[in-house]
Image: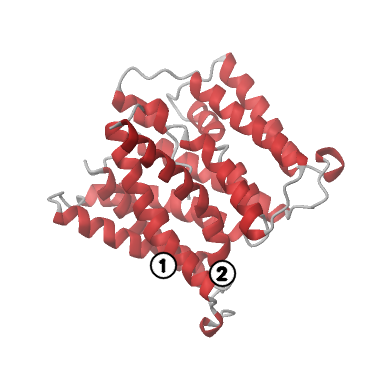
């Protein structure tokens, strides 16, 4: 069993760590919001049909509403903005910023009515973590970077973190299907509708020539659908049932590093010293914040896991 757990965990590291590069390749010749809509429509249909065939009940009307809200926040507000931002921001840096979602979760949890207020250790972790983000995206004369990051891309990524935190907080009390994979599939289906609507409203399709889509973009999209979404979620769900929660949670720390390395290796993204410094600070602060929370049971433990994958 131990070998299976580690194989599944390594697969999760590689799969979800590589999705940022998959997005980068897909949006080279496919509009960002449209590509995400296609990805989650197909993935959602597969998951819902699979779970229904396995005997799971379809969501009730109330559950469709709940999954719709979460899917809109996570997949349109979260993933959609990441895809849009990666037009201007290196995939590795995007992954590092999104990897800071646990910090945004602490803030959102503290602000909501009846939410848990952070203790002093969490506040220290927040301050350290946001310092890491500033080093990563701050002015070049402070960060030491020779590459100027697009401010709109950075703003989109930070907004994606906020939307993801909002969706995660809401999901804690929402009425959702018993099957986590059915829930994910329903979120993907509703989220894809929002992505298609935004794609039309922003006019990205009016400037798009479908005949100019490259094979690399097609492979990137297929990878995101069948490996990033399906294999990733299947591995994640299996690990939640067969491995310690603390071990499963390590994907949130490893994925950004995998994304940075793959971006440098396969997309020629620069690996400057300040990126490694910021990586250590952000990931270290996330580990420190998560270590402050000691859930009493497995169900509670699952709630503190942040699905910051893309």
Q: Where is residue 125 in the image (x, y as percent from the top left)?
A: 61, 23
Q: Position of residue 185 (x, y in %)?
A: 30, 54
Instruction: Work out whether residue 235 or residue 46 is closer to the camera in this orientation and state it.
Output: 235
- What secondary structure is found at the residue carrying circle 2? loop
Residue at point 37% right, 28% down?
A: 245
Going from N to C along the chain, the mark reached first, 2 or 1, is: 1
| Residue 59 relative to residue 305: left or right | left
Report how many numbered discs are placed on residues in the image.
Answer: 2
Q: Name the residue under label 1.
A: 38
Quadrant assignment, res 45: bottom left
Tag 2–tag 1 contact (CB < 8 Å): no
The disc at residue 27 is none
Q: Mark 2 points at which residue?
A: 202
Residue at point 51% right, 57% down?
A: 80
For the N terminus, which image quadrant?
Answer: top left
Residue at point 66% right, 49% down?
A: 155
Q: How crowded is mark 1: few (under 14 residues within 10 Å), some or many (20 or more)?
A: some
- Rendered position, 135 above or below 73: above
Q: Extreme right residue here?
A: 141
Q: Extreme left residue here?
A: 55
The answer to whether one can see residue 173 in this image is: no
Q: Where is residue 73 in the image (x, y as percent from the top left)?
A: 45, 49
- Rendered position, 106 above or below 158: above
| Residue 64 relative to residue 128: left or right | left
Residue at point 47% right, 68% down?
A: 219
- What secondary structure is found at the residue carrying circle 1? helix
Q: Position of residue 154 (x, y in %)?
A: 67, 50
């Amino acid at each position: 069993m131990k070998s299976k757990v580690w194989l599944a965990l390594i697969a999760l590291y590689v799969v979800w760590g590589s999705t940022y590069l998959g997005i980068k390749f897909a949006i080279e010749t496919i509009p960002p919001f449209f590509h995400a809509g296609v990805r989650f429509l197909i993935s959602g249909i597969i998951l819902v049909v699979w779970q229904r065939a396995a005997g799971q009940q379809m969501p009730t009307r109330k559950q469709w509403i709940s999954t719709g809200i979460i899917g809109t926040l996570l997949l349109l507000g979260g993933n959609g903005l990441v895809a849009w931002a990666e037009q201007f921001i290196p995939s590795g840096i995007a992954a590092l910023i999104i990897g800071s979602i646990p910090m945004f979760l602490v803030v959102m949890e503290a602000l909501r009515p009846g939410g848990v207020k952070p203790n002093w250790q969490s506040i220290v972790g927040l301050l350290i973590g946001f310092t890491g983000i500033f080093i990563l995206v701050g002015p070049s004369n402070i960060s030491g970077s020779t590459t100027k990051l697009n401010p709109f891309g950075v703003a989109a990524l930070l907004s994606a973190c906020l939307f993801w935190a909002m969706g995660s907080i809401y999901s804690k009390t929402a009425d959702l299907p018993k099957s986590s994979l059915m829930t994910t599939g329903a979120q993907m289906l509703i989220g894809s509708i929002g992505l298609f609507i935004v794609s039309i409203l922003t006019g990205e399709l009016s400037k798009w020539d479908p005949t100019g889509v490259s094979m690399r973009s097609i492979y990137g999209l297929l990878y995101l659908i069948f490996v990033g979404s399906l294999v990733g979620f299947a591995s994640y769900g299996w690990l939640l049932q067969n491995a310690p929660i603390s071990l499963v949670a390590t994907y949130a720390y490893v994925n950004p590093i995998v994304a940075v390395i793959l971006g440098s290796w396969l997309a020629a993204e620069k690996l400057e010293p300040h990126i490694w410094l910021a990586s250590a600070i952000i990931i270290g602060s996330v580990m420190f914040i998560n270590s402050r929370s000691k859930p009493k049971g497995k169900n509670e433990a699952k709630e503190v896991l942040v699905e910051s994958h893309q």
